[in-house]
Amino acid sequence: MALCYCGVFLLLVIALILFRINGRLAMFSAKLNKSSRSSKLAEPDAEPQNAEVEPGTPFNEFLNEDSERRNLSKKEQFKAYRKWRKEKGLNWVAKE
């Protein structure tokens, strides 16, 4: 009879452990769903936006003067643009 009671007790302990594991899994699943929804909301629907250049900007004028400038890397473009602005007198110059 004592063996029967021990068996029932062990089954109850196992059932409690399984319920706790099930609850934790449900909690983790809810957190994953919440984080995946929030990451989807954070992602823009459109493609990554590049810096748009308005038609009347000096940078657009700089690019239109020489079509080869559009093929340069961004770093080289900005370096050439700074030089171009200096040549055109478009930079701010501190008065001495």
Image (cartoon, grey):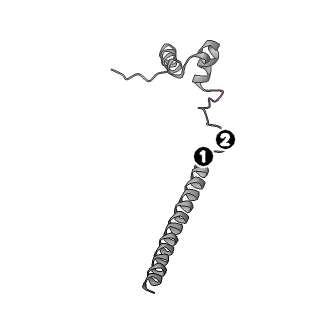
| Residue 79 location (% of width, % of height) | 48, 18
Q: Nearer the viewer, residue 25 or 19?
A: 19
> Which residue is more in the foreground, 30 or 7?
7
Tell me the magenta residue range.
52-56
- Residue in the image at 65% along x and 37% along y: 47
Front-most of residues 32 and 52: 32
Which amino acid type is marked by label 2?
Ala
Residue on which disc 2 sits: 46
Q: Kindly identify the residue that appears in the image at 56 percent across and 60 percent down.
A: 29
Q: Is residue 54 above or below residue 7?
A: above
Q: Which residue is under mark 1? A: 43
Amino acid type shown at disc 1:
Glu
Point out the image quarter for the N terminus.
bottom left
Residue 84 magenta: no
Q: Position of residue 59 (x, y in %)?
A: 58, 23
Disc 1, SS: loop
- The kind of secondary structure the magenta stretch mainly shows is loop
- Residue 8 x/y as whole percent: 49, 81
